[in-house]
Image (cartoon, rainbow, N blue to C red):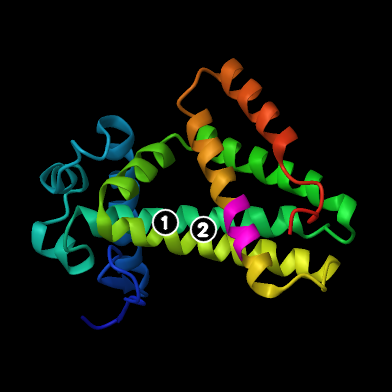
Amino acid sequence: MAGKRKADGTAAGIARLVPVQKRSRERYEHILGSAAELLAEKGSEAFRMSELVERTGVAFGSLYQYFPDKTAIIGTLAERYNQTGRDCVARDLADVNIMSDLHPALCRIVDSYYRMFTDVPVMRDIWQATQADRALQKLDEEDVDFLAGLLADTTRRIAGDVPKPALQAWARLVMTLIAAAVRHAITLPPKEARLLLATFKRMLPNDLSML
């Protein structure tokens, strides 16, 4: 396995090996790209490794060097999109300098997440798969924890007198509710989704007075 390094391995449901050499990396990306296409076409439940082999032309042995099962493929895709989401949240929180900046920033996060799901429809199938698989649920939980940490760190800058445990609990609840609202919205027709999210954004906190 020259030219390859082991993946992080701290969470279940991710690639076994992540290649670094150009040719191997191209094959790896081809597998993931084809997997995303199949997920978008068939959904996570109907997704089969045999179909991925057929579509990519990559032999089972080579495929399994990277991904031992479909959970690993879906988990690797989920982590990529999670990173995109984290970048969006960090960007949307970057301009929070005073308390009055908080509510607009939370609304931007809602809009950014909704656009991600509508612009990349396969994210819906990936999210549904993460809810159905116990190993992948862990990835989703870790992502919420990370996002809550970003929000807690941001609000701590503008409200340093709030106890840390209370602030962390508040931030996790807010991010969990945002995720739930957006994931419900993507199941609705666009007009209904926009109305639901507009209503939800009015419910988001303007300050930390509830703590």
Q: Is residue 172 magenta?
A: yes
Residue 166 lies, in percent from the top left, at: 66, 67
Name the kind of residue labelled 1 in the image. Asp
Q: Alpha-carbon neighbours of circle 1 within 10 Å: few (<14), some, or many (≥20)?
A: some
Q: In terms of depth relative to the viewer, which is nearer, 124 or 134?
A: 134
- Tag 1 residue: 140
Q: Main secondary structure of the magenta part?
A: helix
Q: Alpha-carbon neighbours of circle 2 within 10 Å: few (<14), some, or many (≥20)?
A: many
Q: Is residue 16 above or below residue 54?
A: below
Q: Is residue 196 above or below residue 162?
A: above
Query: In the rendered view of the protein, which quadrant contains the N terminus?
Result: bottom left
Residue under the image location 17 percent in, 58 percent down: 69
Distance of label 2 from label 1 (alpha carbons): 6 Å
The numbered mark at residue 28 is none
Q: Is residue 9 magenta?
A: no
Question: In the image, is 163 to the left or to the right of 71?
Answer: right
Instruction: State the SS at label 1.
Output: helix
Question: In the image, is 44 to the left or to the right of 105?
Answer: left
Q: Quadrant of residue 170?
A: bottom right
Residue 126 lies, in percent from the top left, at: 36, 44
Name the kind of residue labelled 2 in the image. Val
Total labels drawn? 2
Asked if disc 2 and disc 1 are in contact, CB closer than 8 Å, the reply is: yes
Residue under the image location 71 percent in, 69 percent down: 153
Instruction: State the SS at label 2.
Output: helix
The numbered mark at residue 144 is 2
The residue segment tinted magenta is: 169-174
Q: Is residue 72 above or below residue 108?
A: below
Residue 196 lies, in percent from the top left, at: 61, 25
